[in-house]
Amino acid sequence: MRKYLLLTTLLSFSSLFAIAQSTYWQQQAEYTMEIDMNVNTNQFTGNQTLIYQNNSPDTLTKVFYHLYFNAFQPGSMMDVRSRTIADPDRRVMDRILYLDEDGIGYQRVTSLKQDGNDLTYETVGTVLEVNLSEPILPGKESTFTMEFIAQVPLQIRRSGRDNAEGIRYSMAQWYPKMAEYDEHGWHSNPYIGREFYGIWGNFDVKITIDSSYVVGGTGVLQNPEEIGHGYLPSGKKLKRPKGDQLTYHFVAENVHDFMWAADPDYVHTTAQVPNGPLLRFFYQADTLTENWQQLPDFTVRAFQYANKTFGQYPYAEFSVVQGGDGGMEYPMSTLITGHRSLRSLVGVTVHEFFHSWYQGVLGSNESLYAWMDEGFTSYATNRTMAQLFGPGRANGQEQARSYGGYFALVQSGLEEPLTTHADHFDTNRAYGSAAYSKGAVLLHQLSYIIGQQTLERGMRRYFNEWKFKHPDVVDFKRVMEKESGLELDWYFEYFVNSIRTIDYSVQSVEGERGETRITLERVGLMPMPQEVLITYQNGDQQLFYIPLRIMRGEKDSEGEYERTLLQDWPWTFPTYQLMISHPKSEIQQITLDPSGKMADIDRSNNTYPSVNPSTFSEEGLMNE
Ligand SMILES: [Zn+2]
């Protein structure tokens, strides 16, 4: 223990990596819900049966539910946060403050029982605090039965009614949802805006609503012949019951959330991914219908590429639903705004469906490790969009905009470590650029350290080994270590836990008795392995590779250039010298990191003779 403490003090990094992975467990939830929606008052009544399995080694004496709609009330934590943060989300600003009684949202629990016994509970903003009548012992389950009433708020953030494009209901975060309890304890975060974390389980949901409404979202519809509305294969006869109400019955297995959306004007189309899911599209016909008609073909091709490159999507269906206020991911579905160019429509769809891999199926605690979700999703989206549309203009590099976003964040002085809880970043910008841009850079840059093919194998192995298990940073790091045979602690310690940056330079080039002495300097605090490309006057090129000593090895040659492996670089040494057996006059150019994958914040000193570095454009961040 003493040795262990000494070690962490010496490293002076956060305790994140000190939390060793113990025997693995996770909680389990089975939701059965019936809700009755009144489309005139925008209110609904609901009942919920939740079978909660405590797989933890701990005895639970209380539980917490999220009541997300309560955020849409004047004076809520979300309202105050939106009005006081330096760079508020333009979709929220002070709009919550001005919601009237009909416009606010709420979820009010009217009855709650545990195994038939009444419980005492208190609503504290967006969280229901519940004292159990009987503790739930390790390995035991309890059945909670609840009745609740709710009002759908005017659309402000993600969920609500009557969004900017006229979609009636975007029903995310609409039901009382049990908070997650894991090896770090309870995560009853109040809802103030960012990211979610939930318990995997099964959902059986019956939604009764005006029969003119088309409903789509998470899950697989169980009664298509009663519903019609595009759910029946064409030509099949409808057995819809007479009446002005319909009850949609959805079942979703092994998901950690359930979203639905409803509108009387939805067009509902489908497309089949070969060896993949059935895709559903729900949108309002208007002047941009042509883009929505082209979307299925792009989405099918994107899913095929994703399945092959990042692991197989495990559910039977996926739905792209017009709604919400930008783009937001949910299990088996997404809510996106629809008034977009074709490229933007495809881009947001691809980004959101990739969350099926990193949020839906891997399900890392997004609040704590938003970059493992948003960053990896952004990385995969960039690659897939390059497949569909060709590489972007900036350098032809797929990840260039993510690098631009990260570099701009560093320059802004607003950067905070990736270990910051998503809700607690000081600015929206610092959160967005960290989670999306730096997260994507982390992955692409990892391919510089371990090799592109190794990274690709590692990503599939990570998905297959950790699906449905809530992996954290160490779990990801270990997969990449096993796949590469390299030690990678230092990489995550610097790039995740700190805001230290990378800057290497070609310090000097000197001719010496027919040879050339090149001195490289580590200018920034973060160490990295180095690749030095030398181009000779006769056009020959030679790549020199300098691993870091703390990697305890080197990556495989990637074959693009003839590679010369040099002595490793101990990170405490500020400089490194290499001798080239050519006279200085034969050297035309020296380039550090010819791949451009290293996130070197000052590339002006990476070449000899120096040339102007390429510039990056900053990433736009409307998709979530
Ligand atoms: Zn996202």
Image (cartoon, rainbow, N blue to C red):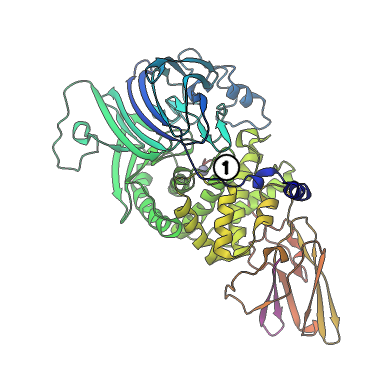
Q: Give the residue displayed 58% in from the left and 43% down from the top.
A: 369
Expressed as whole percent of the image width and height from the top left, the position of residue 382 reads: 52, 54
- Left or right: where does residue 458 sit relative to residue 540? left
The kind of residue on which mark 1 rests is Ala
Q: Main secondary structure of the magenta part?
A: strand
Rendered view: 402 above or below 570: above
Task: Place residue 414 in its image quadrant.
Answer: top right
Rendered view: 29 above or below 307: above
Numbered disc 1: secondary structure: helix
Rendered view: 507 above or below 260: below
Q: Which residues are magenta?
A: 530-548
Res 417 seen here:
no
In this view, the residue farthest toward the bottom is: 514
Task: Place residue 47 in its image quadrant.
Answer: top left
Q: Give the residue displayed 59% in from the left and 54% down from the top.
A: 477
Expressed as whole percent of the image width and height from the top left, the position of residue 22 reads: 56, 45
- Left or right: where does residue 211 sit relative to residue 23? left
Decide which of 121, 382 is in the foreground and name it.
121
Expressed as whole percent of the image width and height from the top left, the position of residue 139 reads: 44, 34
Q: Is residue 344 shown in magenta?
A: no
Res 574 seen here:
yes
Q: Residues within 10 Å of mark 1 (few under 14, many from 20)?
A: many
How many labels, in total? 1
- Label 1, on which residue? 370
- Left or right: where does residue 216 sit relative to residue 492? left
Rendered view: 181 above or below 537: above
Q: Give the residue displayed 60% in from the left and 64% down from the top.
A: 450
Expressed as whole percent of the image width and height from the top left, the position of residue 265 reads: 31, 31
